[in-house]
């Protein structure tokens, strides 16, 4: 017992001695990002203790111990590197909070959190353009303000705002007072009253970053031209009806992205009866309830909050649809755009079918999961389906009236083979993993390479190394290594092995772009292996239509569109006119020779050999390769602008 007491007391004695010696501790300039959390990397110097280090960095000892469990023994070693969590980093001049943007955050929410105006923000961040949105991982600056009675939580995490409306004296000469009804959103109200989201929130600050409450009253500033008795003009638009499932999940997407995702009902004059009324059903897996539970649990655990990847993609795609539908507001067509949160299985779909919710639908967009696609196809509904996320060509072979908005996996394999043929003097090595999917993909890659006239060899990856790769590489040739799996640990080992072979061989490694999100891989590896990836999108940011889309998207959602938003917009712009021409039979008039010059690049829908009747995929694939400055440029097809980075 005595020995245990002595052992426990020794670290405490040293800690006290270190504190009284007042060792000068310099704040480290080395930082690292792990799992969305930013850390200083502090190297322990002579005389420093855990107590003195934590005091210098203004952090709690328990927070440092949580991320450095090896420190639980209470001893530090000179030269030891420890991680210090960065909560609110202060700039060197002491004037700004340095903040790293987290996934899902928007500039609007951060301005509210740090009590900063848009002008103050851009003054503090002169390198940022007002036309660009902030992205996860960006380091941005917020001015430090003196604390007042009204501003006492500048840098604290946001607290949930209670949905109690602010009571103000009514002034109906300057404002319209609107009572919120079921299903209404901020975005819908801004469209109805022709005002901006900023103006609306400025007059109703308690609405920032929370859903509306049914029955609450909000005030809308009147336009100068309006008299006291004027009522707002409702402009006819391409309508988006947000039909909820029984658990009313659809409208609850807003807390996830801080976006209001619904457009306005048209007035009766815009509704036509001569077969120009069409209904489109968007079937997405928003998983709202599950995400809200996740966010609540993450908040309790004090970990960075994030939504599910599938949900984020669904919301981004939906947002792109809404912006594109605005293009048809003045067209001789009325579109009812119904959105459903269908979860991950077939339960809600079954209820919808039994309830007749798809009886009068002319086109379906979705679902996201193959099992749901197979289920709907098995019912022989006779409704064409646009598939935004599915890439398995077996769907197109088994069922009619299915259109993949992205290239199928076979399209990708064929285009990669054509890229290999374009390289010239190419030695293709197909890396086969241990899964059945990888084995099947590898065999199909071999066939595609042979059809393109490219020499190709299949190599086995046994879980730790690529068998016989050293002897398979050919000096003097471009060795194109194609990886047919995506497992992070396996990819890390492949890159490590290939990296060592780059000095004596010309190598290009091509794989799915998602591997660039793996935090375990040193970014230098991508440059050394001349990493290339295939993509379904090529955006020309100089194009006026692209600029206009970005501006509209930013105005509506306070962030920039991503890949799924561009694909959604191109789909709306391509298929709504076809729907207008032929109704739900539009697949019969689809021109396989037509090339759409879309916002996200070219789109050409073709029916490949073996596809079922009226089933198509977008065959256009782009291959990007890393450059010396770590940017990516298109290397295939060669007709594309190589400066598109």
Image: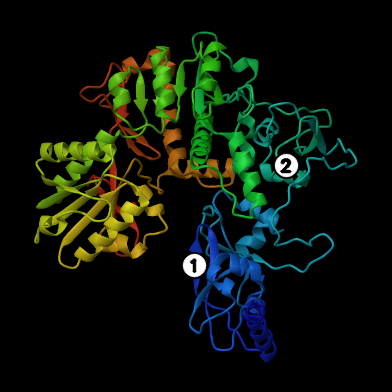
Give 639 or 485, whichever is nearer the viewer.
485
Q: Are marks 1 and 2 in contact (CB under 8 Å)?
A: no
Q: CA distance from mark 1 to mark 2?
A: 39 Å
User: Would residue 624 be seen by someone viewing this image from the given angle?
Assistant: no
- Using residue 412 as the reference point, say whether residue 337 is left or right of it: right
Query: Looking at the image, which residue is at 23% across and 50% down?
Result: 461
- Counting from the top left corner in percent of width and height, residue 227 is at 81, 32
- Counting from the top left corner in percent of width and height, residue 572 is at 45, 28
User: What is the basis of the colouring in this image?
Assistant: rainbow
Give 496 or 111, whichever is nearer the viewer.
496
- Counting from the top left corner in percent of width and height, residue 9 is at 67, 81
Which numbered disc covers residue 32? 1
Which residue of the protein is positioned furthest toward the right in this rendering?
169
Query: Looking at the image, which residue is at 87% across and 41% down?
Result: 167
Give 415 or 273, whichever is nearer the viewer.
415
Which numbered disc covers residue 42? none
The quarter of the picture where residue 526 lies is bottom left
| Residue 352 drawn above or below residue 7 | above
Residue highlighted by disc 2: 200
Disc 2 secondary structure class: helix
Query: Looking at the image, which residue is at 51% across and 47% down?
Result: 560
The quarter of the picture where residue 258 lies is top right
- Counting from the top left corner in percent of width and height, residue 150 is at 82, 59
Foreground tag (1 vs 2): 1
Q: Assess disc 2: are there few (<14), some (14-19) or many (≥20) residues with their C-alpha within 10 Å of its C-alpha.
A: many
| Residue 465 drawn above or below residue 336 | below
The quadrant the N terminus occupies is: bottom right
Disc 1 secondary structure class: strand
Q: Assess disc 1: are there few (<14), some (14-19) or many (≥20) residues with their C-alpha within 10 Å of its C-alpha.
A: some
């Amino acid at each position: 017992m005595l020995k245990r007491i002595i052992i426990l007391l020794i670290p405490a004695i040293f800690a006290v001695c270190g504190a009284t010696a007042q060792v000068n501790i310099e704040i480290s300039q080395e930082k690292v990002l792990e799992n969305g959390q930013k850390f200083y990397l502090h190297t322990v110097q002579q005389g420093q203790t855990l107590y003195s280090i934590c005091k210098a960095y203004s952090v709690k000892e328990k927070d440092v111990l949580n991320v450095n469990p090896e420190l639980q023994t209470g001893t530090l070693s000179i030269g030891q590197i420890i991680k210090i969590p960065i909560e609110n980093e202060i700039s060197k001049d002491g004037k700004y909070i340095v903040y790293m943007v987290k996934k899902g955050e928007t500039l609007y929410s951060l301005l509210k959190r740090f009590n900063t105006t848009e002008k103050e923000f851009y003054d503090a961040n002169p390198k940022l353009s007002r036309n660009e949105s902030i992205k996860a991982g960006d380091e941005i600056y917020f001015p430090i303000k003196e604390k007042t009675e009204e501003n006492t939580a500048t840098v604290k995490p946001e607290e949930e705002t209670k949905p109690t409306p602010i009571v103000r004296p009514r002034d109906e000469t300057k404002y319209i007072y609107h009572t919120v009804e079921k299903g209404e959103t901020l975005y819908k109200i801004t469209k109805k009253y022709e005002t901006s989201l900023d103006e609306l929130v400025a007059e109703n600050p308690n609405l920032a970053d929370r859903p509306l409450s049914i029955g609450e009253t909000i005030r809308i500033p009147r336009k100068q031209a309006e008299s006291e008795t004027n009522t707002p003009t409702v402009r006819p638009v391409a309508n988006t009806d947000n039909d909820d499932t029984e658990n009313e999940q659809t409208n609850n997407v807003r807390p996830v992205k801080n976006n209001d995702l619904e457009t306005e009902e048209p007035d009766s004059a815009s509704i036509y009866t001569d077969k120009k009324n069409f209904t489109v059903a968007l079937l997405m897996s928003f998983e709202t309830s599950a995400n809200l539970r996740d966010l609540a649990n993450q908040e309790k655990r004090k970990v960075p909050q994030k939504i599910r990847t599938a949900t984020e993609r669904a919301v981004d795609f939906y947002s792109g649809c809404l912006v594109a539908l605005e293009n048809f507001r003045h067209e001789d067509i009325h579109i009812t755009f119904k959105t459903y949160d269908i979860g991950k299985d077939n339960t809600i779909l079954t209820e919808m079918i039994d309830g007749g919710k798809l009886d009068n639908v002319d086109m379906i967009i979705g679902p996201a999961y193959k099992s749901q696609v197979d289920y709907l196809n098995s019912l022989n509904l006779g409704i064409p389906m646009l598939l935004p996320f599915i890439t398995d060509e077996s769907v197109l072979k088994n069922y009619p009236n299915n259109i993949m908005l992205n290239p199928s996996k076979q399209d990708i394999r064929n285009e990669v083979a054509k890229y290999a043929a374009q390289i010239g003097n190419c030695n293709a090595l197909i890396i086969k993993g241990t899964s059945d999917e990888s084995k099947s993909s590898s065999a199909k890659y071999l066939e595609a390479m042979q059809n393109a006239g490219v020499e190709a060899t299949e190599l086995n990856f046994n879980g730790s190394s690529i068998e016989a790769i050293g002897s398979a590489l050919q000096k003097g040739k471009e060795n194109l290594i194609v990886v047919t799996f995506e497992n992070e640990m396996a990819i890390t080992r492949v890159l490590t092995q290939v990296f060592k072979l780059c000095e004596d061989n010309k190598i290009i490694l091509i794989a799915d772009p998602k591997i660039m999100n793996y935090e375990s891989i040193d970014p230098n590896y991508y440059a050394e292996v001349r990493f290339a990836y295939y993509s379904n999108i090529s955006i020309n940011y100089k194009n006026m239509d692209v600029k206009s889309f970005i501006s509209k998207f930013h105005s509506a959602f306070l962030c920039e569109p991503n890949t799924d938003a561009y694909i959604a917009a191109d789909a709306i712009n391509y298929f709504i006119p076809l729907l207008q021409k032929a109704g739900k039979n539009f697949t019969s008039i689809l021109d396989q020779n037509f090339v759409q010059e879309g916002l996200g690049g070219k789109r050409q829908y073709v029916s490949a050999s073996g596809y079922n009747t009226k089933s198509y995929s977008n065959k256009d694939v782009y291959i990007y390769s890393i450059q010396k400055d770590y940017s990516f440029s298109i290397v295939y097809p060669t007709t594309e602008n190589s400066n598109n980075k």
